[in-house]
Image (cartoon, rainbow, N blue to C red):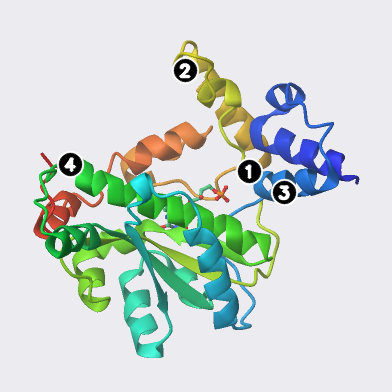
Amino acid sequence: MGDLDKLEAALVRRFGEEDAARLPASGLNPMMLEALTRMTARGSARKFRPDPVDLGLVKLVAAAAFSAPTKSDLQQRDLIIIQAPDQRAALNALLETQPWAADAPLMLVICGNHRRQRRLHELRGREFVNDHLDAFFNAAVDGGVLLSALVTAAEAVGLGCCPVSAIRNHSEEASKLLNLPELVFPVAALALGWPSETPEISPRLPLSATLHLDHYNDDGEAETIEAYDARRHAVQPYDKQRFPKRFGVSEAYGWSEDKARQYAAPERAGFGAFVRDKGFKLC
Ligand SMILES: Cc1cc2nc3c(=O)[nH]c(=O)nc-3n(C[C@H](O)[C@H](O)[C@H](O)COP(=O)(O)O)c2cc1C
């Protein structure tokens, strides 16, 4: 398969025939095609070879990722590489809902950090007068940008990875374990290693639903979701259904049913209290 064919095949699998056909993939040089194909054909890796990942390589991947944009150049994100076996074992225990994560050769934790900004105010003797939701939001977004860039950088060197927001199921304990002070909070963990199999390309909603021109428009969204459920079911059916005792077993169990069932159960209801305890005012 040529470079262009690979990209086109990944686009079709990801977004569906109709959307992919509208994208002008031809006319790009081989380097561009390779970069876009890598991003389009990627998938989260949850199965790894036991081989260790060289710390130098991880630092290089981290350096590339920290080069991603940061809100107002504030640099409100940090990364913790979990190295010590006892520290890793304690983190694994907090990720008990993700048993696959225990076998990942390496675990990183991405943190939002507003503490450093407050230090700048102390150091420069300037009052901080923006103590409201924006302070938390900026650090959380900066953490998200770092997470995304880490995924792209890791996958560029052939590593596999998967974000793990399950760490926030136990934010308080994770915070203690990692010595996170006031105004520093976990955004997600990132499992990292050499993948033992090529991850699947997971179909996404069509671009017609998520990519808008000039104005937001969700006309016909119910039909779009129904068609997406069917397209996805044909290539990547769910192997188990959530909460069958509560909701029964559904004949046509698709993405929309899975996501609606997922958030029909309470999840991380204490996260707001945790963030407030960390010193953020969310007003
Ligand atoms: C912020 C964030 C948190 C995530 N947390 C988890 C997690 O706790 N467990 C997990 O298995 N996958 C987690 N994922 C991975 C998503 O499930 C995955 O990206 C999604 O199913 C789409 O699959 P793909 O990445 O292979 O395209 C997370 C992804 C993101 C961006």
Q: Which residue is mark 2?
A: 222
Residue located 20% across and 75% down the image: 176
Q: Earlier in the sequence, mark 4 or mark 1?
A: 4
Q: Which of the two discs, 2 and 4, sits closer to the camera?
A: 4
Left or right relative to 223: residue 116: left
Q: Earlier in the sequence, mark 2 or mark 3?
A: 3
Q: Earlier in the sequence, mark 2 or mark 1?
A: 2
Left or right relative to 154: residue 264: left
In the rendered image, residue 175, in percent from the top left (x then y), is placed at 23, 70
Quadrant where the C terminus sits is: top left
The residue closer to the viewer here, 122 or 156, is 122
Q: Which of the two discs, 2 and 3, sits closer to the camera?
A: 3
In the rendered image, residue 26, in percent from the top left (x then y), is placed at 83, 31
Q: Which residue is mark 1?
A: 236
Q: Which of the two discs, 1 and 3, sits closer to the camera?
A: 3
Whether residue 45 is visible: no
Q: Which residue is mark 3?
A: 35
Left or right relative to 174: residue 193: right
Q: CA distance from mark 2 to mark 1?
A: 20 Å
In the rendered image, residue 89, in percent from the top left (x then y), is placed at 37, 83
- Looking at the image, do the residues carrying marks 4 and 3 touch, with CB atoms under 8 Å apart? no
Instruction: Count neighbours of disc 1 (C-alpha within 10 A) and say few if under 14, some if 14 to 19, many if 20 or more.
Output: some
- Looking at the image, do the residues carrying marks 4 and 1 touch, with CB atoms under 8 Å apart? no
Q: Earlier in the sequence, mark 4 or mark 3?
A: 3
Query: Amino acid type of disc 4?
Result: Leu
Left or right relative to 148: residue 126: left
Q: Which residue is mark 4?
A: 133
Query: Amino acid type of disc 2?
Result: Ala
